[in-house]
Image: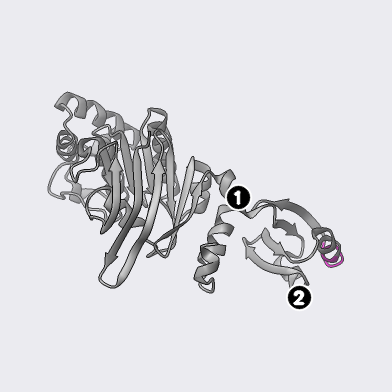
């Protein structure tokens, strides 16, 4: 059984193909991450799942239903463009969204109380949305997506603009929802978040699927071809060293792909600087993302 089943879906806007022959299946009870560069088709795909947009070709099934009203009461959605009814109080807003999903007033009030407490908004419940700060409004938008107790929750860039404390509360909330049995699909540009949270990761590039699997499965495709180093000399010590095919610089740590034997490279590096860390590792999701999506990458290589 799948919660979302997309089969050979294509979506065009005039002469632009935003999504091209996409197929994927989201299993129940997982956190499924959507990654990809800006303009790659992530939001378009999420909007087709929500039936905000209709595909030009292919089929989409959500919670076993394929009609334009399929399972609407069982799906929660946090859009990329945030927007709430500013003249409503927060409590009234949550009652409105919860009742739209077919929940009783008692159920909605119970869920609202729980979420308002979790996000430290209890004392704001009877204030109008327009009086809330940007961060509070973002939290309110998330609560409005989950107050109806959805079976499927779709979040488009949920962590965007949140400070570290609120991002952590949101992360814990998503994990708690997954433990309760909710299937969560979310898009993100934060590769570390995707690595840490997602059971499965899907990457779309130029409208086509290029990755789909667990982190282990994705990393296994690229093998143990990355060197992670920390040296006393930092990045300056790497200048002019032979055998470096590409590098990601993270400040104190660098990740390299080599064209020579790692032991030979280790010997050359040790002749220049003190080595504090030297590991042969699988590439990070960030590194894999950059390999596929870097501007100079040609289309054939990206889809290999």
Q: Is residue 166 visible?
A: no
Residue 262 or residue 237, whichever sits in front:
262
User: Which residue is pictured at 29% across the width and 47% down the height?
Assistant: 60
Which element carries disc 2, helix, strand or loop? loop
Disc 2 designates what residue? 240
Is residue 141 on the magenta stretch? no
Quadrant into which the N terminus falls: top left
Q: Residue at x 37, y 40 (%)?
A: 184
Secondary element at tag 1: helix
- Residue 103 rendering spot, x and y as whole percentages: 18, 29
Query: In the picture, residue 28 is in which quadrant?
Result: top left
Q: Is 32 situated left or right of 123 in this image?
A: right
Name which residue lies at 23% across and 25% down: 110
Q: Where does residue 191 sit, x and y in percent of width and height? A: 51, 53
Rendering colour mode? one colour
Q: Are the residues tagged 1 and 2 within 8 Å (C-beta)? A: no
Nearer to me, 76 or 222: 222
Using the image as rendered, state which of residue 233 and residue 58 is in the foreground. 58
Number of residues whose C-alpha sits closer than 10 Å to that of mark 2, classed few (under 14), some (14–19) or many (20 or more): few
Is the residue marked by circle 1 packed among few (<14), some (14-19), or many (20+) residues within 10 Å? some
Rendering coords of residue 177 (x, y %)? 37, 33
Residue 212: give x, y in percent of width and height.
Answer: 48, 49
Residue extending furthest top? 106
* Number of marks in the rendered image: 2
Mark 1 and mark 2 lie on one chain; the one further toward the N terminus is 1
Q: Is residue 270 magenta?
A: yes
Residue picked out by circle 1: 219
Task: Kindly identify which numbered label has been placed on residue 61.
Answer: none
Whether residue 59 is visible, yes or no, is yes
Q: Which residues are magenta?
A: 268-273
Q: If the image is split into quadrants, where does the C terminus sit?
A: bottom right
């Amino acid at each position: 059984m799948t919660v979302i089943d997309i089969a050979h879906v294509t979506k065009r806007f005039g002469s632009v193909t935003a999504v091209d022959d996409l197929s994927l299946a989201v299993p129940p009870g997982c956190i499924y991450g959507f990654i990809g560069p800006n303009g790659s088709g992530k939001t378009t795909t999420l909007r087709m799942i929500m039936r905000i947009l209709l595909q030009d070709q292919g089929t989409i099934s959500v919670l076993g239903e394929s009609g334009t009203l399929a399972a609407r009461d069982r799906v929660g959605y946090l859009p990329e463009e945030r927007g709430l009814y500013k003249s409503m109080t927060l409590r009234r807003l949550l009652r409105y969204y919860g009742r739209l999903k077919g929940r009783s007033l008692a159920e909605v009030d119970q869920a609202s109380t729980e979420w308002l407490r979790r996000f430290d908004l209890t004392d704001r419940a009877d204030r109008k949305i327009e009086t809330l700060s940007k961060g509070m409004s973002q939290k309110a938008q998330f609560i409005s997506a989950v107050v109806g107790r959805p079976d499927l929750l779709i979040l488009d860039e949920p962590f965007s603009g949140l400070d570290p404390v609120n991002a952590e509360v949101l992360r814990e909330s998503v994990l708690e929802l997954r433990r309760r049995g909710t299937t969560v699909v979310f898009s993100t540009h934060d590769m570390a978040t995707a690595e840490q949270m997602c059971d499965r990761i899907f990457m779309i590039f130029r409208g086509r699927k290029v990755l789909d699997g667990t982190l282990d499965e994705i990393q296994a495709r690229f093998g143990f071809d990355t060197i992670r180093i920390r040296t006393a000399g930092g990045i300056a010590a790497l200048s002019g060293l032979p055998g470096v095919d590409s590098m990601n610089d993270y400040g104190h740590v660098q990740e390299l792909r080599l064209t020579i034997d790692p032991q030979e490279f280790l010997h050359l590096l040790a002749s220049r600087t003190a080595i504090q860390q030297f590991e042969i590792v699988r590439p990070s999701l960030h590194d894999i993302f950059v390999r596929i999506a870097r501007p100079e990458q040609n289309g054939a290589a990206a889809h290999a």
